[in-house]
Amino acid sequence: MQPSMSLGNRDYISLNINDSIINSTITSKSLWRQWNQLSRFQRNVIYFIVLTILLITFYFLPGNTKNSILDSETDYDNGQVVQDTPKATKLAEELVLVDSNDNGNQAGGGGGGGEGGGQVIEEPEFPPDINQIDDEQIGEPPQPKPNILKFNGPQNDRQKAVVAAFKHSWDGYVKYAWGHDNIKPISKGYHEWFGLGLSIVDALDTMYMMGLNEEFIRARTWVDENLKFDVNRDVNLFEVTIRVLGGLLSIYHLSGDKVFLDKAVDLGDRMMPAFSTRSGVPFSDVNLGTKSAHSPKWGPDSSTSEVTSIQLEFRDLSRSTGQSRFETAVAKVSEHVHNLEKYDGLVPIFINANTGLFRDHATITLGARGDSYYEYLLKQWLQTGKTLDYLRNDYTLGIYGTQKHLVRRTAKNKFLFIAELIGVSRDMKPKMDHLTCYLAGTLALGVHHGLLAEHMDLAKELTTTCYQTYAIQPTFLAPEITYFNVQENDDDNINQMDMYVKSTDAHNLLRPEFIESLYYMWYFTGNKTYQDWGWQIFQGFEQHTKVENGYTSIGDVRNPHNTRPRDMTESFWYAETLKYLYLLFDDTRQLIDLDRWIFNSEGHPLPIYES
Ligand SMILES: *[C@@H]1O[C@H](CO)[C@@H](O)[C@H](O)[C@H]1NC(C)=O
């Protein structure tokens, strides 16, 4: 019974095929007759249309050809565009321990391996080689496979306490400031800076890492439905890049959710006009709605750290979308600054976007407006798989210059600090911004990746000093700026102390830089002292900045009885301070694998590429 049925089926099919062949023969005959009846003009029009369709098809089919041609024209990788000044290069190479063979191995290890942190990587077979093109998506730009990570929430009491602090702070934001940039937790109001829901975007990856799923999904929905960039308002290119672009890209890579990438592309497009300057050095401000850019209101210059701390984000946007123009624009800035003359690798803090030159006699500091220039040299070198030597050389030179010109010690206890150089004569000013405390972590990261081991000594001493800036205050919180006493032979009372604070500098904005460094120091050394120091500081935040609806900046760390609360929660509290505390208390040191990820300047992890 069965064989005969199948035989019948076959007959039926073959009949069908014959039918369709006959049908199509008839159709083509009548088409040919109609063709012959057309006028010459009509036929020419049809020829033209067919040709146009063919041309369009050929243009789009190879998909990435256009990009790769552009890439090779602007290749900064092969040393054609970038020319190190011979003297600087030689010095830098003497300072660097890594040889090029070692280089390749390390890059490979960082890119493909990541054995250490394997436990939480959901799909470790995903190579972070974003240059891989997905064959199934012909006609679309190459889509990277996101390095999706899964997190299991707090694992110990300290992590639980940090998550509780986040939740307390977040609940206030949700209740009183939802969708606005910042909460004012005392007046139960909000503060608008750029009008981009800064706290939400900055907090996304922190919530994701802490396992706060409900909060995360709510924030994700807000981003999807309410985050709009076509607003006629000037924003600061650097701040929006590290907080919003960096935040979106980071959570895109961690979660694999393409909603975040789409938002990032829209934002990146709107910021591109900032680079339309004569030198390529971007203007500091850009209007996302009108897409026009200009210098800041306070003067003609951009901050050096700002124009040199947007590269990780724009490069990642290019790698994530296959659109090279973002990376091309920011790489040009780095190469330009690389070719400027420096003071033993140190840079003045202002640069003119039109002339492309440093403001000669501007302050030299590793604090405000200078800090992340040095940080992004190292991190860009790591992001690109240690393939761009000029970045490593400039970083190493910068640290050399720091050691030569800026490292000083207090008279009494010989605490090491990083001073500033002021004005034409480059006078030493014995003050250090809290911001400078990021440097210890960056130095440790560099040493882990093969740079001079002696940088670790500097990192450890700076960590100790920064800890002191917290520990000597009765609130156990550091001020914004600390001054140091370097006078050896002085009987003056004030000089009996190593450190002092001016009234105008006594505020604490819930800043993250020292917690960030403690995390790196803990990660690379496993020395529990760094965890304990972080715990003490966390208690300081708990006791002196916690209010009914969150945590607030305070005006005076010197007086626990009158801290002068400022009624403000900066978005980096969510993005960095609480995230780094959470990571610092991760006893496994495996939540984020620092051979596979680099944190941007706002604490948002981005993947490391092979080149
Ligand atoms: C851990 O770090 C602290 C602070 O720098 C230091 O005093 C201590 O000696 C270190 N412990 C070890 C075992 O290295």
Image (tube, rainbow, N blue to C red):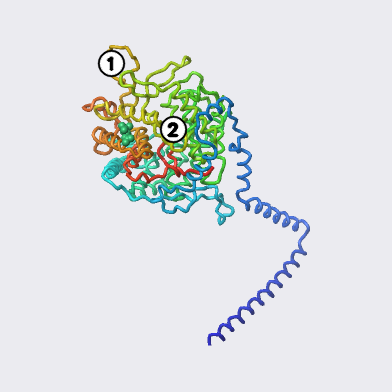
Q: Residue furthest left?
A: 561
Residue at the spot 42% in from the left edge and 22% down from the top edge? 406
Measured as percent of width and height from the top left, residue 66 is found at: 63, 46
Q: Nearer the viewer, residue 570 or 82?
A: 82
Measured as percent of width and height from the top left, residue 439 is found at: 41, 31
Helix, strand or loop for disc 2? loop
Q: Nearer the viewer, residue 421 or 144?
A: 421
Q: Nearer the viewer, residue 369 or 83?
A: 83
Left or right: where does residue 128 sit relative to residue 497? Answer: right
Q: Is residue 122 visible?
A: yes
Measured as percent of width and height from the top left, residue 514 is found at: 35, 32
On-image quarter of the C terminus: top right
Q: Which residue is mark 2?
A: 453
Q: Is residue 237 visible?
A: no
Q: Residue furthest bottom?
A: 1
To which quarter of the image does residue 414 belong?
top left
User: For the residues carrying marks 1 and 2, which lies nearer the camera in this image?
Assistant: 2
Residue 494 numbered tag: 1
Helix, strand or loop for disc 1? helix
Residue at the spot 45% in from the left edge and 27% down from the top edge? 370
Identify which amino acid the numbered label 1 is placed on: Ile
